Image (spheres, grey):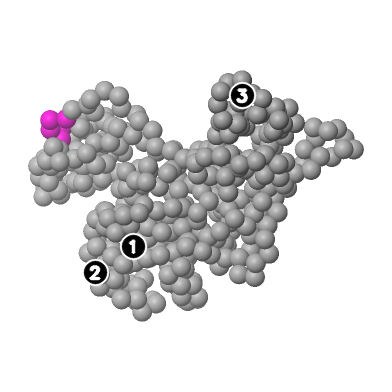
Amino acid sequence: MIKINYPKHRKKFEEDYVAIFDIEKIKKEWEDEFKKIDYDISENSIKKLLVLPFDELLKIYQDFTDNKSIKKNEDDKKTLYGHYQPEIANFFMDYSKELNLKTCYFCNIDFINVFATRFDNVEYKTVLDVIEAKNYDDLILLKGIGPSIANKIIANNINSMEDIEKISGQGIKEENLKKIKNIDISKIDFKSQKNHFTLDHFLPKSKCPILALSLYNFVPSCSSCNTKFKTVQNLEKEHLSPTSSSFSVQDNIKFKFFFDTKVKKDDLNLLITYSKNEDKDYEKYIEAFELENRYKFHQNEALALIKKQEKYSETRIDEIANILKISPHQVKKDIFGEELFNGDIQDKSFTKMKRDVAKNIGIKGVKE
């Protein structure tokens, strides 16, 4: 529903993202996949693929999925996403302020955010200190260990470097054990935060593994939109990804309401209307995320606005402003909610719905 506004300094943003990856590893793992669509497998080409705009990713996706000989792949190891997922999540956490991660970009219902988990100053002097702490988030930052070994360290109550060899199948190779022992933890930024969001692959990685790591294929979203509603939908043909330059769902759908007077005045019926567009099926987007039914459950948010508007006319607001010696606009923000007049849609849940309803009932000054 909400277009993602990326940082102004896009070049650094993209360079920081590419720096996460071992390009040679990607080249080796995906060589066969690239050959299937005659895609250039050079280092520069792979780096470019990681930060291609969504519309260009869509073209590659269509070429890939049009090839009937390519089988669907559900294995995260094959897509390399499982290997890089912690680093990718950390990247989005690092840029959470620039990306304004506050509510789900698909629905504007649930919050997505980054939050602090450590308020004491934990200090590690050696790798063994990190291992003994058994903090998963800190362990996976040790490049020689990784997510799978971190899980085993925690599950098997490992407390020494020597015991690590016992938990990894046939054991960790000697050279890797030396790497772990020699990690300079002074250069590692141990995060004191976690995230409350999921990263949706808008173009499914199961259908096109080579886009599983592409930055503009990721949509920060709530768990419900990612796992319950979008799983079997085919929105990619509609360019309806919040990462796309042509995304305009927030401008082309509107929340409207009417009262069922046959029942009672407070029986509000909330509807979502949409613009007709030959290239973009907004109805499919609304249906994919079940927006109408989900918003109907929260329609009391809209009803509260309507009741306040009935109670506080423009004349009444002017009177309150004169008594309090503040502007009528400030009175409106205090009564109806600041999100109607200031900030971005994703700052607070239900802002899109509230603004549409507010305009519909004649509250003046609502932000476009």
Disc 1 to disc 3, how far (Cα)? 57 Å
CA neighbours of label 3 inside 10 A, class few (<14), some (14 to 19), many (20+) = few
Q: Along the horizontal axis of the image, is 29 left or right of 325?
A: left
At mark 3, the secondary structure is: helix
Give the residues drawn in magenta, as a range: 124-128
Q: Earlier in the sequence, mark 2 or mark 3?
A: 2
From this viewpoint, which residue is outermost toward the bottom?
Answer: 38
The amino acid on which the numbered mark 2 sits, given as a three-letter code, is Glu
Overall secondary structure of the magenta section: loop
Reply yes or no: does residue 127 show up in magenta.
yes
Which label is found at residue 50?
1
Residue 198 in sight in this render: yes
At mark 1, the secondary structure is: helix
The amino acid on which the numbered mark 1 sits, given as a three-letter code, is Leu
The amino acid on which the numbered mark 3 sits, given as a three-letter code, is Asn
Say which residue appears at 65% left-offset and 41% top-offset: 364
Q: Earlier in the sequence, mark 2 or mark 1?
A: 2
The residue lying toward the viewer, choosing from 168 and 316, is 316
Residue 297 in sight in this render: no
Mark 2 lies on residue: 43
> Which picture quadrant has residue 11?
bottom left
Mark 3 lies on residue: 322
At mark 2, the secondary structure is: helix
Contact, mark 1 vs mark 3 (Cβ under 8 Å): no
- Residue 278 lies, with reference to residue 256, above or below; the image says below
Contact, mark 2 vs mark 1 (Cβ under 8 Å): no
